[in-house]
Amino acid sequence: MLNSTDRTRRQRRTTAGLALALVAAAVAVGSGADFSARTANPENTFTAGALSMSNSRDGSAIFNVANLVPGAPGASGIVDIGNTGSIRGRFSLSRGRLSTTDKGDPSPAPLDTKVGLKVSDCGTFDGANAPSCGVNAKVVYGGGTLASMTQAIPLGTFAPGEKHRYEFEATLDSSAGNEYAGDMSSAEFVWDAVQ
């Protein structure tokens, strides 16, 4: 049996142990010692790219061919088309409006079915230096007539700042007879670029 002195000592030891445990718990909870770090990249900006083009003959004809003779060498015209935007674009050429005027004897078919058309990509500019058209030019439309140019012609992807020279050549088919004398055809050529 414990006497009162032993009991008091035991209570003090228990109380002291409890107090020590409470102090340790308070230190552990109260310190909250976590390491942390942070960094930031402020003011990020986002700008949409632009796709635009240059056309050296913008708003005017590439060529006006007069006095075509059946089966004879034709006439040619040059136009420079470039990507002046900030993103790459897929370029194409198509024929827009087409009209024919029959001035003499009634023709069996419109003149545009007798006008042969060839379009060649002469190449890419090297800075301000234009490529020369000739044997190295790539034919993008050939062997057809003005009337048969009904689909868009893909010209490839142009990088920003890339510019090409194109040569158009027109001839009058040798089968065109006197009934075509004085007839006239007019066509619009349209350049498109898409992302």
Image (cartoon, rainbow, N blue to C red):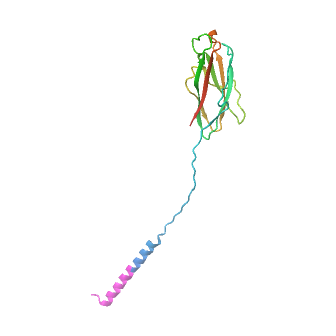
The residue depicted at 61 percent of the width and 25 percent of the height is: 188
Q: Position of residue 42 (x, y in %)?
A: 57, 56
Question: Farthest residue toward the front?
Answer: 103
Locate the N terminus and report the quarter of the image it occupies: bottom left
Question: Farthest residue toward the right?
Answer: 129
Locate the C terminus and report the quarter of the image it occupies: top right
* 29, 168: nearer the viewer: 168
* 134, 92: nearer the viewer: 92
Q: Position of residue 50 (x, y in %)?
A: 59, 41
The residue depicted at 39 percent of the width and 80 percent of the height is: 19
The answer to whether 99 is drawn above or below residue 18 in the figure is: above
The answer to whether 86 is drawn above or below residue 72 in the figure is: below
Q: Where is residue 122 in the image (x, y as percent from the top left)?
A: 67, 28
Count of marks overlaid on the render: 0
Quadrant for residue 154, please give it: top right
Q: Examine the residues drawn in magenta and state their main secondary structure.
A: helix
* 138, 184: nearer the viewer: 184
Quadrant for residue 52, please give it: top right
Q: Magenta segment range? A: 1-18
The residue depicted at 37 percent of the width and 83 percent of the height is: 13
Is residue 15 in view? Answer: yes
**Residue 10 magenta-highlighted:** yes
* 94, 138: nearer the viewer: 94
**Residue 154 magenta-highlighted:** no
Quadrant for residue 126, please give it: top right
